[in-house]
Image (cartoon, rainbow, N blue to C red):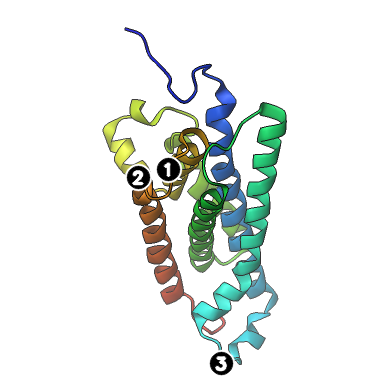
C-alpha cells in the first residue's frame, strides 16, 4: 500500500505546520491579551468612569478588544511572510479569503478572551484560565497530532474548539487553493462559536463594579 500526498508530494513538514502555526499564535495571544486587558481595567478601577457612560456592555467590551483585531492581522501577515521567505511555503489560494478566515478566527479567539475575563477576578487568574483554554486546543486540533489518528471521543471534543476549524481553513486555502465556498462549514463553525461565546460573555458582563 502506497500513500500518495497530492498537495505535499515532498512531505515537507513546514507546508503543514506553518499554516497551522498562525492559529496557534493567534490563540495564545488573542485570548491571553484580551482577558488580561479587561481584567486589568477592572483591577485599576477604570470601569468606574465607563459605568457612567450610556454605552452598553457589548459596546464597552468591543471598544476594548477591537485594537487586538489589528494586532492579530499583523501577526498573520508576519507568519505568512516568514513562512514564505524562510520555509518557502506558498499561498496557493486567495489571499483575501485567507485574511477573511483569519478575521473570523480572531473574532472567535477574542470572544473567548472576553468570556475568560468575566470568569476571573485577577490578572494572574486570567493568565491561568487562558492557558487552560489554549493547551487542549493545541493538543487536539490536529496541530501536533494527526486528527484522524485521535480517539473518536477526542475528535468530537476537538470539534468544539475554534482552532480545529481554523487549521482546516488555513491548510485548505494555503495548500489546496480551496475557497471559502468549499470550506463554509469550518467558517460557519467559527461564526457559531463567536456568537455563542460573545453572547454568554455579554450576559455575564455587568456595567457595575464587583
Q: Are marks 3 and 1 in contact (CB under 8 Å)?
A: no
**Mark 1 — residue?**
164
Lower position in the chain sequence, tag 3 or tag 1:
3
Q: Are marks 1 and 2 in contact (CB under 8 Å)?
A: yes
**Mark 2 — residue?**
159
Lower position in the chain sequence, tag 1 or tag 2:
2
Rendered residue at 63%/54% (across/down):
73
Lower position in the chain sequence, tag 2 or tag 3:
3
**Mark 3 — residue?**
54
Q: Nearer the viewer, residue 62 or 13?
A: 13
Q: Are marks 2 and 3 in contact (CB under 8 Å)?
A: no
C-alpha span from label 2 to label 3? 38 Å
Rendered residue at 56%/28% (across/down):
15
Q: Is residue 43 depicted above or below 20 in this figure?
A: below
Q: Is residue 121 depicted above or below 160 in this figure?
A: below
Q: Residues within 10 Å of mark 3 (few under 14, many from 20)?
A: few
Q: Residues within 10 Å of mark 2 (few under 14, many from 20)?
A: some
Q: Position of residue 193 (x, y in %)?
A: 39, 58
- Residue lying farthest to the left in this orientation: 152
Q: Secondary structure at mark 3?
A: loop
Q: Position of residue 126 (x, y in %)?
A: 58, 59
**Residue 117 location, quadrant:** bottom right
- Quarter in which the C terminus is drawn: bottom right
- Quarter in which the N terminus is drawn: top left
Amino acid at each position: 500500500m502506497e500513500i500518495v500526498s497530492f498537495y505535499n508530494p515532498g512531505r515537507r513538514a513546514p507546508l503543514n505546520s506553518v499554516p497551522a502555526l498562525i492559529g496557534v499564535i493567534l490563540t495564545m495571544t488573542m485570548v491571553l491579551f484580551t482577558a488580561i486587558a479587561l481584567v486589568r481595567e477592572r483591577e485599576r478601577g477604570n470601569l468606574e468612569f465607563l459605568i457612567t457612560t450610556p454605552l452598553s456592555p457589548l459596546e464597552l467590551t468591543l471598544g476594548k478588544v477591537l485594537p487586538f483585531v489589528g494586532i492579530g492581522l499583523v501577526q498573520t501577515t508576519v507568519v505568512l511572510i516568514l513562512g514564505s521567505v524562510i520555509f518557502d511555503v506558498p499561498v496557493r489560494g486567495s489571499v483575501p479569503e485567507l485574511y477573511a478566515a483569519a478575521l473570523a478566527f480572531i473574532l472567535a479567539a477574542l470572544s473567548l478572551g472576553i468570556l475568560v475575563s468575566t470568569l476571573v477576578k485577577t490578572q494572574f487568574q486570567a493568565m491561568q484560565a487562558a492557558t487552560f483554554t489554549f493547551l487542549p486546543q493545541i493538543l487536539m486540533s490536529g496541530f501536533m497530532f494527526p486528527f484522524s489518528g485521535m480517539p473518536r471521543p477526542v475528535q468530537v471534543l476537538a470539534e468544539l474548539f475554534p482552532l480545529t476549524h481554523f487549521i482546516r481553513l488555513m491548510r485548505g486555502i494555503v495548500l489546496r487553493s480551496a475557497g471559502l465556498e468549499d470550506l463554509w462549514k469550518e467558517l460557519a463553525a467559527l461564526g457559531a462559536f463567536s456568537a455563542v461565546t460573545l453572547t454568554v460573555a455579554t450576559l455575564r458582563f455587568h456595567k457595575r463594579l464587583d
